[in-house]
Each structure stands twice: as structure tokens, then as C-alpha cells.
Image: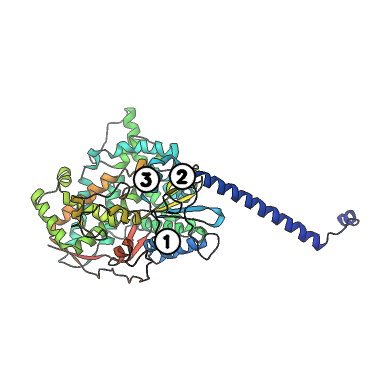
Amino acid sequence: MLSDLTAGLPTPSWHWLAFAAAGLLAAKLTLNYLSAARTEARIKALGGRAPLFGGRLPFGLSFLVGFRNAVTVDETLKFWSDTFVRVCGSRASPYTVETTTVGGLRIIMTADQENIKAILATQFDDFGKGQRFRDDWVDMLGRSIFNSDGEAWHTARTRLRPVFYKERISDLECFERSVKNLLPLLDNNGETVDVKDMFLRFTLDASADFTLGVNLETLKRPLNEFAASFERLRHKKVQRERSKPFKFLVPRSSYQPDLDYIESFMDPIIAETVRQVKAEQAGTSASKKDPAFNLLRASAEVSTDQRFLRDELITSLFAGRDNTAMAFAWMFYELARHPDVVRDLRSAIIKTVGLDREPGYQELKDMKIVSNIINETLRLYPPVPINTRACIRDTTLPRGGGPDGNSPIGVLKGTGIVYSNHLLHINPEAYSDVPADHPPPEEWYPARWDTWFPKPWAFLPFHGGPRFCLGQQLVMVEMSYTLVRIFQRFSQVELRMDELGTVERREQPWLRRGAGPELAERYMKNRPRMVTEITLFPRGEVQLAFIK
């Protein structure tokens, strides 16, 4: 019947079909051109562009492939340094570039102090985590403070701020419980231990104690199922993030059972705490407050919303474990390379506390060498080496544009920002006022902090601006307390591996602006390979021995 209706109609020739297709293509190209022109005009109206990353591959693939390859072979810092040298050359402000990737997403890479200051503080309302980040992490972090913007972030921040007041973070009992399990493992007649593994377990125990009020004792029982699920979940989430834009290669099903297990472990603890708090508030039950502080109990007194508690507690567990563990690993690695610092530390401990009793909060604060050691470690090994933001409304960044890099650049809503805390911390601009008698900035030298402090926005181990880490003082106390307790028992720590680590490091030439190496190249010369994930891991084991 259809053939009868169309029998008298002319059949279009292939010429007309080709003409129509060409017309549609031309219209599409014209629309794309006009859209690109409008976008370019909006950017120029705000301030212009940063230098382009460039490369041989189209659609920003040179950046995506290069960055992924660098992460895979532990050369992330080299990738950043080489990029700025290659693209920015001798510009006055040579630490900002940009590219446009698949789908038209513009990405700005920066390690510029003024730009990072704008992103985190002075233009805080213009930048946030962004919808892409929230979608990527909502399954694990929910709507926690780490994974929210705007009013949701402000509400979470307001709820959590009272939890971290001084009297609570200065309660050292939960750290002592984990230290008592750690010390016998280090006290093994000078045998070699892998402190990276040791402190991953130590900080998980301490974090679970502080957060949930439970003792996992992974130091005593390394095959703990919670710890195993925790590590697999972290690893798979990082793999999934690395696989962008091909996240389907690491499906959610590959880590969902581990996330389910962690939630099933936490949910009854949360529910029982909420029940107790509600009963106490209603006057139907006498207070059963444990004199030992934990984050769950304190948070439940602020809000009994179980989803809020789940999201914030699992976030705190992850933040309190990996970042702190790697700070410990790097700190003891450097102490093993600098026995003179260990001697000075030991002398300060003997003078201030002695060797037989636990240190108090104020005594930890009074030992300047302790904070010097921690700050110097965080300077050279920032816990979060790379971070991201999304522009949430049209704005500018103060530097990166113009022929010298000192002019502003326009940033439209939806633009992605990637900034390197690692390169920021070893940016030569931060060290222009270093005293002449100090060793070069690439060297680990805690005593520099007696007379020197980095320029504003050149040292951000705990973030900066309104989103600064609420747990900053807690981490400093945990590291200080543990450091002192260990060197109350031991007088030396020895390096039991090659200084370059237990895994062979690749030796690829670095790009240079002049005849001499860049600061980042000098920094990496005598250090192990570094894994850039959410935090900064040493590749392979960190083999040390503790000597009485």
C-alpha cells in the first residue's frame, strides 16, 4: 500500500542527497564557529587566555595522554615542570597553561601562587568542587563536606566546626592506644621494617578510634577485613579517576562490595550512637557518654541525621588514614637520612619530657623542633599533591595571560581547574628571601623554620581559604605525639634501602629554561619514585630500622 502511495513521487538522486548532507554539515560548522566565536569573545572580555598546552594529538588528547602516562610511570611532577618550561618559557609568571579536551571542556593547569590564592580564598565563591567531581565521588563520600558546594557545604562546615575545638584534639588517649601497639613492632632488635605499611595500619587504627570509637587493631591483626576492604576501595576509586574519560574500564561493581562492607560495619555503630543521643536529649535515658572523645558522638550531638553522619565519618576515615600515613612515612625516611636531626630531637625530648612518661599537649607545642620536622616534611611532600576545582560562574584568574604571563585570564563557568600543590611548594618564587646560610630549598632542613616561613600561599599542606582542613591541628598533634613517643624509646633510625628507594626510578631528561636544572629536577635527583594518587605515596617499601 505504501508503495502505491509513493509510486508517482520522483526518486531523489544521489547528487541531491549529497548536496543536502553538505548543507547540513556547513550549517553545523557555521553554528560551531559562531558558538566558538562567542565563547572566545566572552573569554577576551574577561581577560584573555593562558598559553596553550599544544601537542600533536587533537581534542586535547596530548594533554590527557601525557598526563596519564606521567602518573602511570611516577613522573607527575616532571610532567608539570616540563609543561611549564616548554609552554611558558621565560615568561615573568610561567606557571599557568590551558587546553581544551574531548567534548570542549577547557582545563587550566596552574601552580601560580596568586591564582591559587584566588581559587581558594579571594574568589572563593567563583570556584567549587563542581558537578563532575560530586557525581564521581557521591557513592563513597555522599554529600559530605569534601563533596559539596554552596549552602550544602556551608551547612556541613557549620555542623562540624565545633567538633574540632582545642580541648577535644588535645585529648591524647586515642593516639596512645595505637602507639602502644606500634612500639613493639618497631622494637625488634634492629631488624628492618616497612614503615609505609606500618603507618598505613597505625593511622587506620587511630582514625577509627578517633572517628568511631572502635579499635580495629590492624597493627596486631594485619588481615583485618575492614582494612582490606578499605584499601581495595581506595585503590579502585583512584583507578576509576585515572581512567577518565573511560571510567567504564573500572566499573562501580568492582568496588561496590567493599563499600557495602564498610557501610555495614559503620551503620550499627552510628545507629546505636544516635539512639543514645536521642534518648538522652528526650530525658528518657541517663547520659552514657564515654569520657573518651570520638567524632561520631560529638557529631551526633550536633545532628542525628544518619546520612549526614555516615557521609562525614567515612570521609574523615579516608582523610585521616592515607594522608597522615604517608606524611609519617616520608618524615621517618628523611629522619633516617639525617641522624643529626634525630640527635637534636632526642635532646629536646629528654630536656622537655624525659624518656619515661607520656608527653602532654603543651609540651608537644613547646618543642619547636617537632613542628619544624613536620612542617619541613609537609613542605617537600605535600599530602595532596594535585587538586581540582570547577569554575561555577564567569570570572577571571589574576595571572597567566598576556605576553609576560602577568595579565588576567578569563574563566567561564564550567571550566576545569587543576592545580599542583607539589610544584607550588617547590616554586622558586617562594624562596627568594631564604637566608644565605640555609641549604638549597630542595633539601630537607627542619632548622630553616626557626628563621624562615614561606611566602603567603606558597605552603598549603592543609589547604587554604574557607575550605582549610578542619583536622589540621588534629593531624599535627597526632604526628607530634607519635614522633616524641617513638624517640623516647629509640635513639636512632637507620635507612635500610638505597636512597632512591626500593623500586628503580626512570631517568628521563628534564626540560630546562637555562643551562642549570629547574628546582623540581634538583628536588627529584636523590629521592624515591613518587606515586601521585589522592595523596603522595613512595613507590615500593620504605625500609628502616629503629635502634635503641
Report the residue marked by disc 2.
396
Q: Is residue 355 visible?
A: no
- Crowding at dot 2, Cα within 10 Å, few <14 / some 14-19 / many 20+, comes out as many
Q: Secondary structure at mark 3?
A: helix
Residue 511, compared with residue 148, is above or below; it is below
Residue located at (40% from left, 37% from top): 154
Left or right relative to 368: residue 44: right
Q: Secondary structure at mark 2?
A: strand
Amino acid type at image mark 2: Thr
**Coordinates of residue 227 in the picture (x, y in percent):** 33, 56
Q: Nearer the viewer, mark 2 or mark 3?
A: 2
Q: Quadrant of the N terminus?
A: bottom right
Total label count?
Answer: 3
Residue 230, compared with residue 465, is above or below; it is below
Report the residue marked by disc 1.
83
Left or right relative to 419: residue 338: left
Q: Nearer the viewer, residue 303 or 386?
A: 386
Quote the CA–CA distance across marks 1 and 3. 21 Å
- Crowding at dot 1, Cα within 10 Å, few <14 / some 14-19 / many 20+, comes out as many
**Coordinates of residue 339 in the picture (x, y in percent):** 15, 62
Report the residue marked by disc 3.
117
**Coordinates of residue 404 in the picture (x, y in percent):** 42, 53
Residue 517, compared with residue 305, is above or below; it is below
Quadrant in the rendering for residue 167: top left
Precedes in sequence: disc 1 or disc 2: 1
Residue located at (37% from left, 38% from top): 157
Q: Nearer the viewer, residue 127 or 197?
A: 127
Quadrant in the rendering for residue 193: bottom left
Amino acid type at image mark 3: Lys
Q: Secondary structure at mark 1?
A: helix
Left or right relative to 61: residue 386: left
